[in-house]
Image (spheres, helix red, strand yellow):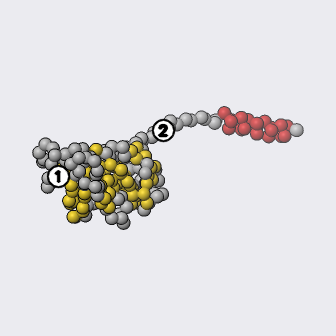
Amino acid sequence: MNKIFTKAALAASVSLFAFNATALESADVQASVTVQNAFTFTNDAGLNFGTIRATADPAGTTTATIVMPANPGADPVATDGTNASIAELVRGERALFSVSGVAPFGTLTLDSSGITGNVNAVTAPPGTPKFTIGTPTFWLLTGGAGTGALFTTTLQVDATGAATFNMGATLTTDAAVTTSAYIDGEYRGTFALTLDY
């Protein structure tokens, strides 16, 4: 009887000792995040309608146009008015844009409302006719869904967060009353294209 009691008491005391020896420890952990809303958007080549022969309607009644398509497989199309004309002499080039630094397969929204306005002679006397630009079109060269096709307001980048696309537009002769012909030389205009991520 005494032996049994002794063993039981010893077992109880060992268990109690082990329980009292347990210790609690804590460690701090830091949480962090890096925000990168910025991305890279560049115009790698300007929109060039090439070298043309052009006449404007002195009365400003009719206009002529040349359409530079965004599709790299399509040719520019010139259309004359009754008293206005455009003829292509040297082929131009579509505008080229590139995007990078976007999340994989991210979608961006395009605002092309700034692609409209005047294209004026770099050096010209007063009264020289101008051109106008408008009706932009876009072709996704590389990217995610929709690659190799026209797009309007949204584009998707590829798995690396990058995309490239062309822009075309329509060049129109002056619709105002003019007192002189187009002079030889370069005509320019600067326009804004916006991507929202």
Q: What residue type is labelled 1?
A: Tyr
Residue at the image position 20 percent from the left and 59 percent from the top: 53
Q: Residue 31 carries which label?
A: 2
Outermost residue, bottom side: 73
Q: In which quarter of the image is residue 20?
A: top right
Q: Determine the CA span between mark 2 and mark 1.
A: 65 Å
Which element carries disc 1, helix, strand or loop?
Answer: loop
Give the amino acid at mark 2. Ala
Quadrant for the C terminus, please: top left
Horizontal and vertical percent position of residue 138: 38, 55
Quarter of the image holding residue 151? Answer: bottom left
| Quarter of the picture holding the N terminus | top right
Residue 97 visible in image = no
Give the answer, above or below, for where 76 lies relative to 9.
below
Q: Where is residue 22 in the image (x, y as percent from the top left)?
A: 63, 36
- Residue positioned most to the right: 1
Looking at the image, which residue is at 56% across and 35% down?
A: 25
Q: Which of marks 2 and 1 is nearer the N terminus?
A: 2
Task: Determine which residue is flagged by label 1.
Answer: 182
Percent coordinates x, y for residue 47 in the rendering: 27, 55
Front-lying residue, 22 or 50: 50
